[in-house]
Image: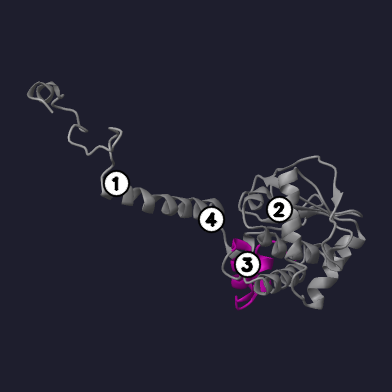
Amino acid sequence: MSEGAESREHPRDPWRRTRVGEQGDPLLPRWFAILAVVAVPLGLAVSVIAFFGFGRGEILLAERRPPGGGGLTTDVGTLQAGEAEPVVLDGACPVVDGVRIAGEPGDLRVLREGFAGLCRRALASEVVAPLRALGDRGAVVRFAVFARTGVDATSRRGKGPTIYLNAKYSRTEPQWLAPLVAYEAAMLAGDPAAADTVLHARRAERTVCRTLGLQTRTPGCRDAAALLALPDPAAALRAAGYR
């Protein structure tokens, strides 16, 4: 660089001594590149933890799926769901034969893959029976947005029940849906206001969590294990409003 060019450098230009590549583009310092590589996955991890942990950690364990009302198994506050026509869940397995799913094409793909988790492994009879009952009743499963963002799922009871899964699970690993469906199936098979029904549903959920190796990977699996490990889980549920 000539003396004249050197003299024309702006004295406050922070990039004037930065290394450049063959095309004259500034090259970032190595420490900056390393920091960026480390920061990206760390930021994603923090986002996931915040996404699933918000509204959950400060709520007592037995209250994270509060008693329902208005025909719902669990209180989720205001519920918003789409109106797409349900389609039959084809090619799954006899355990969920007759179940229908609803949503946009991307939702249907996730739901199909999620139900596949209930078909790949043998499940205990106490889990299978409520799942078969879903198909017998033509149940529909779809995603929905809950005002209570920390609640995982709820169901609308009736002759043809509908299971609503928290929409945030449409953006996770599909197999995370399987324990939630097992939980809601058990809730629909009993009195959803009774603590004993919740305990049975939590046991079904824990069984699927263990079968699929999800014990510590999902909020619901962790909550199920922690609740059932309490000295008196039924008393905790009754204190939370269940009968």
- Label 1 neighbour load within 10 Å: few <14, some 14-19, many 20+: few
User: Residue at image x 56%, y 54%?
Assistant: 52
Q: Specify which label sits upstream in the sequence, 3 or 2.
A: 2
Residue 125: image quadrant is: bottom right
Q: Position of residue 232 (x, y in %)?
A: 64, 76
Mark 2: which amino acid? Val
Tag 3's secondary structure? helix
Q: Are the residues tagged 1 and 2 within 8 Å (C-beta)?
A: no
Q: Position of residue 79 (x, y in %)?
A: 72, 44
Residue 239: image quadrant is: bottom right
Asked if residue 223 is positioned above or below residue 41 in the image, the reply reads below
Quarter of the picture containing the C terminus is bottom right
Q: Are the residues tagged 3 and 4 within 8 Å (C-beta)?
A: no
Q: Position of residue 41 (x, y in %)?
A: 44, 53
Residue holding disc 4: 53
Q: Position of residue 19 (x, y in %)?
A: 22, 39
Q: Which mark is residue 110?
A: 2
Residue 13 lies in magenta, yes or no?
no
Mark 4: which amino acid? Gly
Residue holding disc 3: 221
First to last magenta residue range:
218-243
User: Residue at image x 28%, y 37%?
Assistant: 22
Residue holding disc 1: 32
Asked if residue 185 is positioned above or below residue 81 in the image, the reply reads below
Front residue of 110 and 229 = 110
Is residue 55 something that shows in the picture?
no
Mark 1: which amino acid? Phe
Q: Specify which label sits upstream in the sequence, 4 or 2.
A: 4
Residue 236 lies in magenta, yes or no?
yes
